[in-house]
Amino acid sequence: MNLASLLSETRNVETVDLDNLTTLEMVRCFNREDTKVAQAVSQTLPAVAQAVDAAAQALAAGGRIIYIGAGTSGRLGVLDAAECPPTFGVPADRVIGLIAGGPGAITQAVEGAEDKPELGVDDLQAIGLTANDLVVGLAASGRTPYVIGALRYARQQGCVTAAISCNPESPIACEAEIAILPLVGPEALTGSTRLKAGTAQKLVLNMISTGAMVKYGKVYQNLMVDMQATNIKLLYRASRMVIEATGCDPEKANAALSECENNVKTAILMVLAGISAQEAIARLQSHRGFLRAALAAHTSPKECANGKPSQTG
């Protein structure tokens, strides 16, 4: 695929005077282009939903979500992976971000690393890829050899694969079972895909990881109940979540949290069911960590008075 023919490389006729605008006019121009991103992403939602389901299934099967990309795309995957352990309490090796050129490429460009498909294969082999893993290839252009090589290898190993690109009929979309193609159009700064294309990829990654964690039992209502409370701000947030979910007072919320090592999910179940930390932990384990299911299966008059555990999942 010729680089000049790519939608993401086309000159934007709305921004040809970018260097001649006042500062306010320039940022208005950037903002006007950015408003097109959400609409482009909205057109991809059926495919995003497929990726969310595949990601949740991978986690449930003991597999991993693996993002792999180069440049800005690779950095976005690394960022999304790094935020999953503190937000959802998953081990750091369950969501992995791989970038062409290795960890050093996160902060400094490693030129040429993305041009070798075999390096994508090498990086997947280095982490012991298995058929239970979901591999998500990231490339705004959709033509990065590093990503293409990785996706081909992943499919050979029996993995479910997804691709995120901002160009129609991109090569990585042809290599993956699930193709997510938010077509945001030409960039305000020609070819700088860290702009609209980068924003679109970040929005999609947000949905994949967050949606997968909801379906994996890491969320109750709209609360991130497996968040790791590791600083003062997060301890306060943990207390607020227990209060919001149960209606109890701060003293009771903090007492429950102190008994279960600040595990929000456990504390909520303790308060709503009127049970000890040990009992709450056992209940959650028997329901694969799904708080709503643990509540619904052990409903009592006291629980019904404080919460709404009538739904499962």
Image (spheres, rainbow, N blue to C red):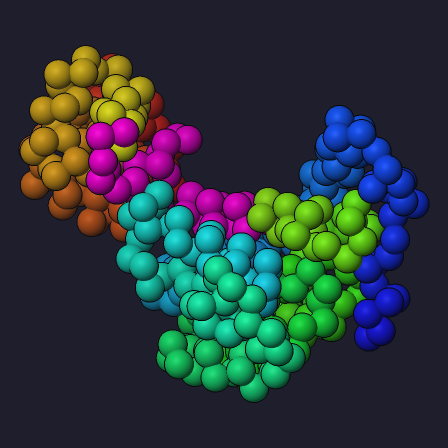
Q: Is residue 251 left or right of residue 288?
A: left
| Residue 298 visible in rendering | no
Q: Is residue 227 left or right of residue 191?
A: left
Q: Is the residue 49 above or below the residue 233 in the image?
A: below
The single residue placed furthest to the right in the displayed view is: 13
Name the residue located 59 percent from the left edge and 45 percent from the top edge: 203
Name the residue located 26 percent from the left edge and 42 percent from the top edge: 228
| Residue 31 visible in rendering | yes
Is residue 211 one of those drawn in magenta? yes
The single residue placed furthest to the bottom in the displayed view is: 118
Q: x, y (%) of residue 10?
A: 86, 57
Is residue 257 one of those drawn in magenta? no
Q: Is the residue 278 above or below the residue 135 in the image?
A: above
Question: Quick one: 57 or 35, which is closer to the camera?
Answer: 35
Q: x, y (%) of residue 139?
A: 65, 64
> Number of callouts in the render?
0
Q: x, y (%) of residue 159?
A: 51, 74
Q: Which residues are magenta?
A: 204-233
Name the residue located 84 percent from the left edge and 33 percent from the top edge: 21
Q: x, y (%) of residue 269?
A: 20, 31
Question: Quick one: 16 or 93, which is closer to the camera?
Answer: 16
Question: Quick one: 81 or 270, which is closer to the camera?
Answer: 81
Question: Quick one: 226 or 305, which is closer to the camera?
Answer: 226
